[in-house]
């Protein structure tokens, strides 16, 4: 083809080889754009389905007297996340970010102004699903004692302000520590492909701050007089079936979370496929590790081997969180190692929270904060240079175990410290303000009765039985069953 031919001048119906080539290229490009748009729509919808997973997991993990409350909070997370990210969240995260200079936050596209194409809208939808995920992590941690008004304030504030600043710093082309900045921090920037730090650490550390300020549930670590108990009291989950259902939904949603973070299907199939495999292997390794390490330690302590389903479920979720940052830059073998260590991180960080008397009703902090932090560190250790190159990162500064030195690891640690520091500065005063204003915790009597009855017009489950008089009448009828067929002898005609 003549390299000087101007395709913009080609007619709608091609008549020459050059015109036909332009027509084919244009058609293929349009098809690729459509496929990429649908791919991102599918991935975003899959991530949004994780809201159902969180709802089921949280509902199953708490006591039955608070199920309505936690389900409503999960639903409102999605609503507050949508409104907060629509109004200012997306603008602070990505608005006007073109990489021309580094800045703290975006400053355009408030209320999605300036959006014109389908690509703009589908990009917002995908990013909103991530924002809602970060927000809903806190719901389970503060379950059974947090006021609804406080939760709404937090959810809107997190998705509208706190989370978008983290997104901008690490994912936007103008972010100071972003790997996508034309002049990345220390030559590489923070590699957090799908959000071990951006999403899970942000939600997890916010949950930790909230739980520490809010305090534990009544009777968990202290008696009625405020004296510390010798052993913490465990509140058994009211529905293990809901817990398992929620875990599987979340695992499924992660296939939109991690592979979907390629943001396109065309040209990214190798990266997306690797993400799917690594996601699967890390979850499996985390599940098995947490389950059997807990069982072995239990047998050493008591002489009896028991298998804790909660350990298995949260170990799998910990493995999913742990691989999220490096799913595109690690080999499958390394993902297994990351999953194994994630299972250990979950197991021992969960025990640490109990020792510190921080009450996490669903163990969201160990899963999301601690395993998310480990996931970022794991990138600095295990990032493979060939995988980094394929994923679009600077392969010269790969993981420490692959000859890249400690630069990437140092950048990952800087990113971790930034997330912790930013959330501490913003959320600690925020939650303390709610507590001082009396807006954070429910009344002790309401907590004893249950938030469903005190706040939501009754229990989630109708467990009332039939009227006792109806039962008595039924018993009488059954006791006479068969006798009704025995008739009295007819008097004889002679008589």
Image: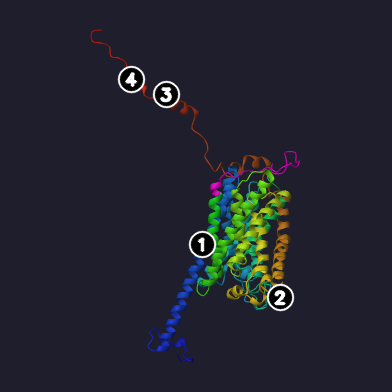
Label 4–label 2 contact, CB within 8 A: no
Residue drawn at point x = 45 percent, y = 81 percent: 26
Against 15, is 180 above or below? above
- Quadrant of residue 319 within the rendered picture: bottom right
Count of marks, rendered view: 4
Label 3–label 1 contact, CB within 8 A: no
Residue underneath mark 4: 486
Res. 186 in view: yes
- Discs 1/2, front: 2
Label 3 CA crowd tier, 10 Å (few <14, some 14–19, many 20+): few
Cα gap from disc 3 to disc 2, whole angstroms: 86 Å
Q: From the viewer's perspective, tell me whether residue 472 is left or right of residue 243.
A: left
Q: Secondary structure at mark 3?
A: helix
Residue underneath mark 1: 45
The stretch in magenta equals 219-242
Residue underneath mark 2: 186
Q: Which of marks 2 and 1 precedes in the sequence? A: 1
Cα gap from disc 4 to disc 3, whole angstroms: 14 Å
Res. 124 in view: no
Report x, y in % for residue 58: 59, 50
Q: Which of marks 2 and 3 precedes in the sequence? A: 2
Q: Which of marks 3 and 4 precedes in the sequence? A: 3
Label 4 CA crowd tier, 10 Å (few <14, some 14–19, many 20+): few
Cα gap from disc 4 to disc 2, whole angstroms: 97 Å
Q: Secondary structure at mark 1?
A: helix
Report x, y in % for residue 358: 71, 50
Residue drawn at point x = 53 percent, y = 55 percent: 248
Residue underneath mark 3: 479
């Amino acid at each position: 083809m003549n390299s000087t031919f101007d395709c913009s001048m080609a007619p709608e119906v091609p008549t020459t080889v050059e015109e036909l080539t332009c027509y084919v290229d244009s058609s293929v490009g349009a098809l690729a754009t459509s496929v990429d748009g649908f791919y991102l729509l599918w991935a975003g919808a899959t991530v949004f389905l994780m809201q159902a997973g969180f709802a089921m997991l949280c509902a199953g993990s708490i006591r039955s007297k608070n199920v309505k409350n936690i389900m409503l909070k999960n639903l409102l997370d999605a609503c507050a996340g949508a409104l907060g990210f629509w109004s200012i969240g997306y603008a602070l995260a990505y608005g006007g970010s073109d990489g021309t200079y580094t800045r703290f936050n975006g400053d355009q596209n408030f209320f999605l102004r300036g959006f014109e194409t389908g690509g703009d809208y589908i990009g917002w939808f995908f990013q909103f699903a991530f924002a809602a995920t970060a927000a809903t992590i806190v719901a389970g941690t503060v379950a059974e004692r947090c006021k609804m008004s406080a939760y709404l304030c937090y959810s809107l504030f997190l998705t509208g302000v706190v989370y978008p600043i983290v997104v901008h710093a690490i994912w936007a082309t103008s972010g100071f520590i972003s790997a996508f900045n034309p002049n990345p921090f220390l030559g590489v920037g923070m590699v957090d492909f799908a959000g071990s730090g951006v999403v899970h650490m942000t939600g997890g550390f916010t949950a930790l701050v909230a739980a520490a300020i809010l305090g534990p549930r009544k009777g968990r670590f202290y008696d009625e007089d405020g004296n510390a108990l010798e052993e913490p009291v465990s509140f058994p989950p009211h529905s293990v079936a809901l817990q398992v259902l929620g875990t599987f939904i979340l695992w499924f949603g992660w296939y939109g979370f991690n592979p979907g973070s390629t943001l396109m299907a065309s040209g990214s199939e190798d990266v997306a496929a690797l993400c799917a495999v690594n996601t699967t292997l890390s979850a499996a390794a985390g599940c098995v590790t947490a389950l059997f390490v807990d069982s072995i330690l239990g047998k050493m302590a008591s002489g009896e081997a028991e298998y804790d389903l909660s350990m298995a479920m949260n170990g799998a979720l910990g493995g999913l969180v742990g691989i999220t940052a490096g799913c595109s830059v690690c080999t499958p073998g390394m993902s297994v190692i990351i999953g194994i260590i994630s299972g250990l991180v979950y197991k021992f960080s969960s025990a640490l929270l109990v020792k510190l008397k921080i009450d996490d009703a669903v163990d969201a902090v160990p899963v999301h904060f601690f395993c998310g932090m480990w996931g970022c560190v794991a990138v600095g250790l295990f990032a493979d240079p060939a995988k980094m190159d394929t994923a679009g990162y600077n392969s010269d500064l790969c993981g420490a175990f692959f000859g890249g030195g400690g630069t990437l690891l140092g950048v990952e640690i800087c990113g971790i410290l930034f997330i912790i520091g930013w959330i501490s500065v913003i959320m600690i005063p925020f939650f303390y303000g709610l507590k001082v204003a009396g807006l954070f915790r429910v009344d002790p009597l309401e907590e004893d009765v249950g938030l469903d009855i005190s706040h939501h017009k009754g229990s989630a489950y109708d467990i009332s039985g039939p009227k006792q008089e109806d039962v008595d009448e039924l018993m009488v009828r059954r006791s006479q069953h068969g006798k009704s067929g025995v008739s009295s002898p007819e008097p004889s005609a002679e008589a």
